[in-house]
Amino acid sequence: MDSYFYKMDLFGIPWMTVNVPNLILTTVAMAIVFFVTFFMSRKIRMYPTGAQNALEYLVQFVKNIIHSTMDWKQGKNFVMLGITIILYVFVANMMGVPFELATANHDVWWNSPTSNPVLTISLAAFVIVLTHIYGLKLKGPKEYGKDYFRPAFFMAPFKVIEDFSNTLTLGMRLYANIYAKEMIMVMLVGLGASSVFWAFGAFIPLVVFQAFSVFIGSLQAFIFCMLTMVYMAHKVSEDH
Amino acid sequence: MFDVTEIEWINAIYQILAFGVLLLLLKKFAFGPIMDMMEKREQHVADQISSAEKNREESEKFLAEQREAIQEARQEAKEIVENSKKMSDQQADEVLENARKEAERMKQNALAEINTEKEQAISALREQVSTLSVLVASKVIEKELDEKEQEKLIQDTLKEVGEDL
């Protein structure tokens, strides 16, 4: 059941390893997000119809997430961030649901890019760094620094640890969910491909599990967005 | 522990950069316009609500004004009717009074006329009596009645004539 990714070292430098399938898959995910929303938002009218309604619903959904975590005064900066996160993570989660591509010797060429820990943790780290940047920007360096010593001065080390643990948990949660989903899916498909009997036996569980995968993927996208806003709220809100 | 060089740093960096680019692209081409439109719509709805509120207030004011105007008109109409009634009463009184006066005057006239007629009749009668008496006298003379009888005849005749008056 081991799967391998085609990797190469850029310019032959050992630390510049590139995971080529993942590079392509992230690009594809982003392209899907961009083109779908791009073509959905071509006709924008005062009285919304069809696609515009759907996108406006999404905007409202993200706005509600932000409203539930922080004041709108600070929250209005993060609507685009929330939308991009939720769409990108959702599409990336969904990519592995309908099919997976792998060569005969388990070289994977198509799966959910979010089943790669590097991608999820780097995205989480990016988000956490963004929270610090916005904390500095919206509250000023003085308030931002003081926040480390609230509610008591000895909390400072925990706050530093929290930053790292947040990054790790935020990324690992997404990665682990999607990776497990991929694994179970691959196993079910492998089982179904093993014999004619199991092809019928594994069909119904596979369908059920695909439905569950869609649920997991949507839920994880929502959770990622939600937690981003929660961490952001910790850094930017004036009182908590 | 895992080897740091095993981590695909290029992938991570690529993804983050691409994420940033995606964010900007979405903002510029898809969600920016949509959020602008949503804001515009919110503004539009708020404007509509406030203008509707204003219109309602205005119409209420108008309604009150109209009500007042109707009340005034009713009052005026009442006054007019009362005035005209009063006037017609007065006129009727006047007409009645005039008629009474006229009648009085006519009665007076008639009385005066009657009186003059009476005077005239009396005088005419008197004249006639005198002529009659002359006639009687001449008749008496013609008949040559005795003195007593003549006197009696004259007296009777006079009495007769006098009684008629």
Image (cartoon, rainbow, N blue to C red):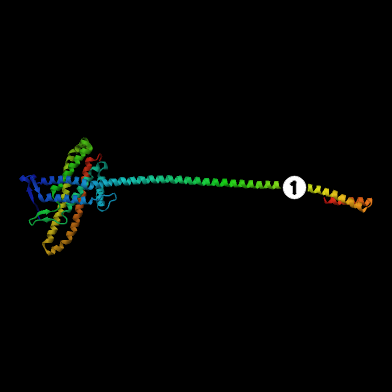
Can you say which quadrant of the picture contains the C terminus of chain A?
Answer: top left
Name the subunit of mark 1: B
- Position of residue B163 measured from the top left corner of the image (x, y, whole percent): 84, 51
Does residue B84 appear left or right of residue A107 in this picture? right
Does residue B76 appear left or right of residue B21 in this picture? right
What residue is at 35 percent from the left and 46 percent from the top?
B49
- Position of residue A116 measured from the top left corner of the image (x, y, whole percent): 13, 50
Q: Quadrant of residue A98?
A: bottom left
- Position of residue A21 measured from the top left corner of the image (x, y, whole percent): 11, 51
- Examine the rendered structure and indicate whether residue B157 appears above or below residue A163: below
What residue is at 92 percent from the left and 53 percent from the top?
B143
- Position of residue A85 measured from the top left corner of the image (x, y, whole percent): 19, 47
Q: Which residue is mark 1?
A: B113
- Secondary structure under tag 1 reads helix
Can you say which quadrant of the picture contains the N terminus of chain A?
Answer: bottom left
Query: Between B4 and B55, which is closer to the camera in this rendering?
Result: B55
Query: In the image as oriented, which residue stretches furthest toward the bottom?
Result: A197
Does residue A160 appear left or right of residue B68 in this picture? left
